[in-house]
Amino acid sequence: MAAEPATWTEDVRPEWIDYNGHLSEAYYVLVFGHATDAVMFGLGIDPAVTGTSLYTVEAHVRYLDQVPPGARLEVRTSVIGVTAKLVWLWHEMRSDGRLRATEEVLTVHVDAAAGRSSPLPDDVRQRLEEMRVPVPEHASRRIAVV
């Protein structure tokens, strides 16, 4: 049985609101990045302590609904894939009970001092495997004009 998704919450700051009166697209990515960091630190991956980190190598954001000023954001993160060095995450951003955006992100485990990829520690990989859920329907899609 898969673990519950990791959850990150954050309030929308006034300076994140764009000229259209809602959350600017760059700040969706910022909040998703904070959610990724929370998962990383929760796993015990900490550059200052372990000398390792997760680097994002690819991401795909779907902007599904506007986020109003002052909203409380909740990002639920699931693990949808793991290899020896890679962690594939699925973020869902909600506000007021509505799905506002998703982000699919592929990260690589890195030895920060060496500046290159390195295998995940066995205990971390095991925990990630235990957190793994089936790949969501909207993951692995591409942008196309039809």
Image (cartoon, rainbow, N blue to C red):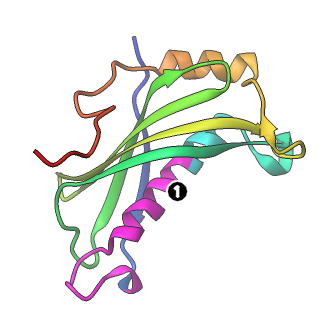
Locate residue 4, reporting x and y percent. Answer: 40, 28
Q: Is residue 66 above or below residue 126?
A: below
**Residue pushed farthest left?**
146
Locate residue 23, reporting x and y percent. Answer: 29, 74
- Would you name the residue on which mark 1 appears? 34
| Front one among 21 and 38 | 21
Residue lying at 83% horizontally and 51% vertically, measured from the top left: 48
| Front one among 72 and 88 | 88
Residue lying at 60% horizontally and 28% vertically, measured from the top left: 86
Which of the 4 quarters of the picture holds residue 70?
A: bottom left
Q: Is residue 52 above or below residue 79?
A: below
| Front one among 52 and 108 | 108
Locate residue 73, reporting x and y percent. Answer: 33, 60
Q: Is residue 14 left or right of residue 130?
A: left
**Residue pushed farthest top?**
1
Residue lying at 59% horizontally and 50% vertically, measured from the top left: 37
| Front one among 96 and 15 | 15
Span shown in magenta: 15-36
